[in-house]
Image (cartoon, rainbow, N blue to C red):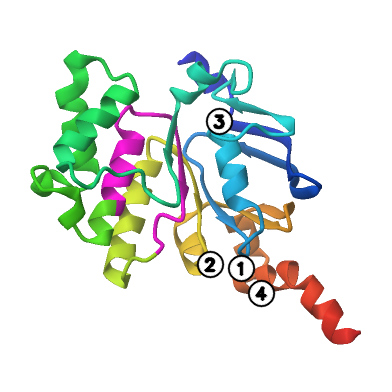
């Protein structure tokens, strides 16, 4: 057994963050194991991207603790980040490069040894169905293919944890379906968190859901548990994220 298998893939305790006097995230906790795929939900401004940036080591929390595969992200960031793949809301693509050139560059950034580089690029392209476009300039590809390139750079070093910020935003229905298939395939060997505004895709492909509202956790539950209780995610989401609207209307 790998030493890392003894620990949760992601363990975050009481994460908080503020912009000046404004508290953006307050005491958020997460614990995910290998094979979990978590749908991260919340209205615009709920703090989702801020939490994801903290989990990936791109933003230092004001308080709290983060462990990735048992490694403390705050005290040993380089070691912890080796186990993380990250696709931010705006994919970090160099659109003047070909897919192959960009993935070789990404592999180097992630510390993939030169002797493994060719196989790493080949595997990432295969997993993300990019083999046929390896020689094409990224800028001429469709939005769906560009999102796949973004995911390919996130998994090229075979991280245990993949964190994706709205990977299906702007995609057409066919592209969204392809993206869902990709996420389900990746789930077999990775732990995944992805944020989204599409409730149905969380119900269809996730086994966990986390709802954030005004920087606070409103729900952290298993999808199968909600289904057993005949609870619909759209109803739950509306009830948990419209309290200020309801209070205004009743005033």
Mark before the other along the chain sequence, 3 or 4: 3
Q: Earlier in the sequence, mark 3 or mark 2?
A: 3
Look at the image and give the residue range highlighted in magenta: 147-169
Callouts 2 and 1 close, C-beta under 8 Å = yes
Disc 2: CA contacts within 10 A as few (<14), some (14-19) or many (>=20): some
Callout 3 secondary element? loop
- According to the picture, the residue beneath numbered tag 4 turns out to be 235
Q: Is residue 17 in view?
A: yes
* 3D distance between C-alphas at marks 1 and 3: 30 Å
Residue 124 or residue 96, whichever sits in front: 96
Q: Name the residue at 14% across, 25% down.
A: 118
Residue 149 magenta-highlighted: yes
* Residue name at image x 68 percent, y 65 percent: 229
| Residue 193: assigned label | none
Front: mark 3 or 4: 3
Separation of marks 2 and 1 at Cα, in angstroms: 7 Å
Residue at numbered disc 1: 233
Left or right: residue 35 versus residue 172 is: right
Picture quarter containing residue 167?
bottom left
- Between the residue at mark 4 and the residue at mark 2, the CA separation in whole angstroms equals 10 Å
């Amino acid at each position: 057994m790998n030493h890392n298998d003894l620990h949760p893939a992601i363990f975050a305790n009481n994460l908080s963050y503020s912009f000046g006097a404004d508290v953006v995230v307050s005491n958020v906790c997460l614990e995910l194991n290998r094979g979990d795929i978590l749908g991260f939900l919340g209205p615009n401004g709920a703090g989702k991207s801020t939490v994801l940036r903290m989990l990936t080591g791109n933003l230092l929390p004001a308080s709290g603790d983060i462990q990735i595969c048992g490694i403390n992200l705050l005290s040993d960031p380089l070691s912890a980040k080796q186990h993380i793949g990250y696709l931010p809301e705006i994919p970090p693509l160099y659109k003047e490069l070909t897919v192959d050139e960009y993935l070789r560059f990404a592999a180097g950034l992630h510390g993939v040894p030169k002797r493994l580089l060719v196989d790493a690029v080949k595997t990432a392209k295969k997993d993300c169905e990019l083999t046929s476009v390896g020689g094409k300039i990224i800028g001429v590809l469709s939005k769906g293919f560009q999102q796949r390139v973004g995911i390919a750079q996130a998994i090229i070093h075979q991280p245990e944890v993949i964190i994706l910020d709205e990977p299906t935003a702007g995609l057409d229905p066919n592209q969204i379906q392809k993206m869902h298939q990709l996420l389900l395939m990746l789930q077999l060997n990775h732990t995944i968190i992805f944020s989204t505004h599409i409730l149905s895709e969380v119900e269809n492909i996730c086994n966990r859901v986390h709802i954030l509202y005004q920087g606070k956790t409103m729900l952290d539950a298993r999808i199968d548990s909600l289904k057993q209780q005949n609870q619909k995610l759209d109803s739950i989401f509306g009830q948990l994220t419209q309290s200020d609207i309801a209070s205004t209307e009743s005033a």
